[in-house]
């Protein structure tokens, strides 16, 4: 009997990446989602998670760093902690426990357009302002610096001069939803 792989999801925004990952793994019985951590009480991801039966933990600036959450996550013994549009820095002690297991997706081709303040539409506006012909995604391991961990995957999309930041965001989000679940599947050794 294969032991299930356990993924903890972290969301700040709409949660579309978390949904894409969850939906992708419905074809496998060997992956569980024991917890979704969210720092935004208005995120649609919270209601979605409750609908599909994923336990949720709403965090704020105080309890996010409290030992309670860390103990809860350690007890789960997760194989991966996936940041899916999660905007807070990960506490250093988490990185000591899970040096390889925390992964983030960034909606640009790091090291360009990364670091503090570079999230969501800010990224796509900066790509547009720089008149880039190509943008894309970067999936990387998380370390103690924003967007600087080892890069695991990059994928690109072409940008037309007429593309608005909103259209760039749409193109990039499509890449995210396609590649993030498939890279996670590879990392977990679960082949489709
Ligand atoms: C995505 O663009 C992701 O790359 C970035 O934040 C956005 C999250 O979108 N980190 P969602 O919450 O997954 O819909």
Image (tube, rainbow, N blue to C red):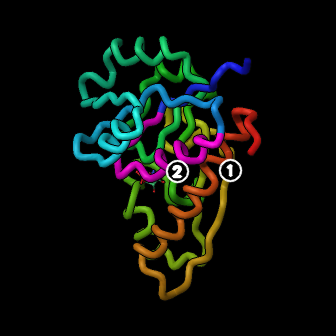
| Mark 1 to mark 2 CA distance (whole Å) | 17 Å
Which of the image's four quarters has the C terminus? Answer: top right
State the residue in front, 57 or 30: 30
The image shows residue 76 at horizontal and vertical percentages of 50, 16
**Is 157 in front, or is 109?**
157
**Depth order, front residue of 83/128:** 83
Ligand 1 within 8 Å of disc 2? The answer is yes
Left or right placement of residue 122 versus residue 135 in this view: left
Q: Which residues are magenta?
A: 9-27
The x and y percentages for residue 140 are: 61, 43
Q: Element at badge 2?
A: helix
Name which of mark 1 and mark 2 comes first in the sequence.
2
Could you tell me residue 40's position as x and y percent? Answer: 27, 41
Query: Which residue is denoted by mark 2 in the rendering?
Result: 20
Q: Main secondary structure of the magenta part?
A: helix
Q: Residue furthest bottom?
A: 162
Q: What residue is shown with label 1?
A: 153
């Amino acid at each position: 009997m294969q032991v299930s792989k356990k993924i903890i999801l972290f969301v700040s925004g709409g949660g579309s990446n978390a949904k894409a990952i969850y939906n992708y793994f419905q074809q496998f019985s060997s992956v569980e989602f024991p917890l979704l951590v969210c720092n935004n009480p208005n995120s649609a991801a919270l209601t979605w998670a409750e609908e599909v039966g994923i336990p949720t933990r709403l965090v704020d600036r105080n309890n996010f760093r409290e030992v309670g959450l860390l103990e809860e996550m350690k007890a789960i013994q997760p194989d991966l902690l996936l940041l899916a549009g999660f905007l807070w820095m990960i506490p250093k002690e988490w990185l000591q426990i899970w040096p390889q297991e925390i992964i983030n997706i960034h909606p640009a081709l790091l090291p360009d357009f990364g670091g503090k303040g570079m999230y969501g539409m800010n990224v796509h506006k900066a790509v547009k302002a720089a008149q880039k012909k190509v943008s894309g995604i970067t999936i990387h391991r998380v370390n103690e610096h924003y967007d600087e961990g080892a890069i695991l995957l990059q994928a690109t999309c072409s940008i037309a001069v007429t593309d608005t930041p909103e259209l760039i965001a749409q193109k990039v989000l499509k890449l995210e939803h396609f590649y993030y679940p498939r890279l996670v599947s590879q990392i977990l050794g679960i082949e489709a």
